[in-house]
Image (spheres, helix red, strand yellow):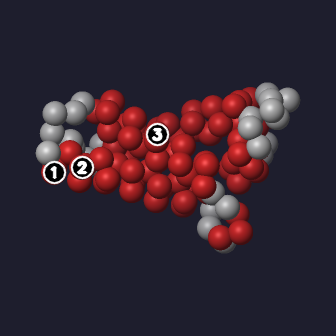
Amino acid sequence: MCNNHSYESFASLSDEELVLIAQQGSDSAFDYLCDKYRVVVRNKSLSYYIAGADRDDIIQEGMIGLFKAVRDFSASRGVSFKTFADVCVTRQILTAVKNASRH
């Protein structure tokens, strides 16, 4: 594992660098990204409603989208991590909303 970084050292790195470190197995880098993007996920979740679910359920779906963004991001695609994460979070929430409306 690449857990030799501290939160303080992460502040000077780009999101793309943090994702690479997280993809290499650093739980600390992943946790840092989750903390950094938690407000973004929460704010995005405010736009959606799932019948029978509470706000935390929608936020959790968004965090799953963020996890997938970290797992699947590739800088070679020519898009920033922030943009990619936004798309992944939105898609995960929309999938949850669609699945809930089918039942």
Residue at image coords 74%, 35%: 26
Residue at image coords 62%, 67%: 79
Does residue 40 appear anywhere in the picture? Answer: no
- Element at label 3: helix
In the picture of the structure, the residue carrying the numbered disc 3 is: 63
Tell me the tag on residue 102.
Answer: 1
- Across and down, in percent, residue 72 comes to 60, 55
Residue farthest to the bottom, as pictured: 78
Query: For the residues carrying marks 1 and 3, which lies nearer the camera in this image?
Result: 1
- Across and down, in percent, residue 70 comes to 61, 48
Task: Check contact, mark 2 vs mark 3: CB within 8 A.
Answer: no
Residue at image coords 71%, 36%: 29
In which quadrant of the rendered view does residue 58 lie?
Answer: top left
Q: Is residue 17 above or below residue 83?
A: above
Q: CA distance from mark 2 to mark 1?
A: 5 Å
Quadrant of the rendering where the N terminus is positioned = top right
For marks 1 and 3 on the same chain, the one whose residue lies earlier in the sequence: 3
Residue at image coords 33%, 30%: 56
Q: 10 Å neighbourhood of mark 3: few (<14), some, or many (≥20)?
A: many
In the image: residue 84, left or right of residue 46: right
In the image: residue 55, left or right of residue 86: left
In the picture of the structure, the residue carrying the numbered disc 2 is: 99
- Across and down, in percent, residue 45 comes to 34, 43
Does residue 6 appear anywhere in the picture? Answer: yes
Task: Check contact, mark 2 vs mark 1: CB within 8 A.
Answer: yes
- Element at label 1: helix
